[in-house]
Image (tube, rainbow, N blue to C red):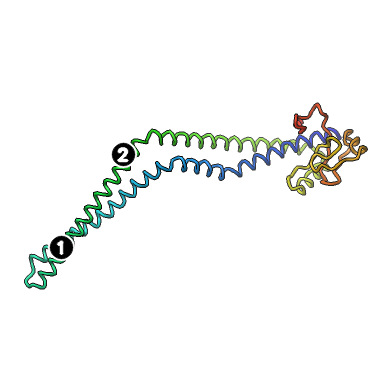
Amino acid sequence: MKAELEQLVALQNVDTGIRRLQSDLESIPRRRAEIESEFDQRAFEFKALQQAGETARETRAALDKELAEQRVRLEKAERDLMASNNSKVYEAAIRERDAAKKHIGELETKVLEQMEAAETAEKQLAEREPEFARLRAEHEERLRAFEEQTRSWSAEIEERRRERERRFAELPPGIKATYQRIVGRIRDGVALAEARNGACSACRMTLRPQLMAEIRRGDDIITCDNCNRILYYQPASQQTPQGTTVSAT
């Protein structure tokens, strides 16, 4: 039975690794959003200048269109003025011409303002381009590193799943069923707990000396009366400094 317990410990170590990697993979959207958010904060001024330039160009385009319409209006008013044959038509043409000229003057002023705004934004962008180029390069490098890490996690989880299938297949049917049943019932999916210092390391329940002796022998599958996990004993020489299990091979 000691061999089966060692197999179970190794299987649990693999399962724990798979859960950790799955958690890492599930965090990808959040972590990517954090990287993008940090870049947006650092490049805020650059993006604001870009937006100012784009807005100025878009506004100028709209003004140019309106300006063209007003020039057509002015030409029509002047034609009407030349063709007028009574004072009423003449006066209406004069009013239309003057209104068009006034509007054209206002629009031309606004066009100049938007041209200056676009030129100012472009000049500032050019002056600060080295700074922003460095920020973009750092951002792209972080994304590349993150993508590489993601690929590494995906590859590792597939490798661990294959190992999991192999180790699980080596267990006797009864032990397989017991392990799966406990995994399905325990919230964290950890089916085994080390019996250490006279207690269950998972729930901290004190174990009777006789029960500890049986666990040390490893002749039977023994579960904790409190948390129902399978208990096993790991000699001190095989523990990590924190007392956690060393993966069985």
Q: Is residue 164 above or below residue 106?
A: above
128 to the left or right of 42: left
64 to the left or right of 19: left
Q: How many marks?
A: 2
Q: Residues within 10 Å of mark 2 (few under 14, many from 20)?
A: few
Q: Residue 227 in the image: x percent, y percent?
A: 82, 46
State the SS at label 1. helix
Q: Between 77 and 4, which is closer to the camera in this rendering? A: 77
Q: Residue 74 in the image: x percent, y percent?
A: 16, 61
Q: Residue 190 in the image: x percent, y percent?
A: 75, 42
Question: Which residue, given by chain and number where applicable, does mark 2 sit on?
Answer: 123
- Asked if labels 1 and 2 touch by Cβ distance under 8 angstroms, the answer is no
Question: Which residue, given by chain and number where applicable, does mark 1 sit on?
Answer: 98
The type of residue carrying mark 1 is Asp
Q: Residue furthest left?
A: 85
Q: Whole-Å distance between the Cαs marked 2 and 1?
A: 38 Å
240 to the left or right of 224: left
Query: The N terminus appears in which quarter of the rendering?
Result: top right
Q: Is residue 161 visible?
A: no
State the SS at label 2. helix
Q: Is residue 153 visible?
A: yes
Q: Residue furthest right?
A: 210
Query: Could you tell me which residue is drawn at 14 percent across and 64 percent down?
Result: 77
Q: Residue 238 in the image: x percent, y percent?
A: 79, 28
Q: Earlier in the sequence, mark 2 or mark 1?
A: 1
Q: Is residue 100 above or below residue 19?
A: below
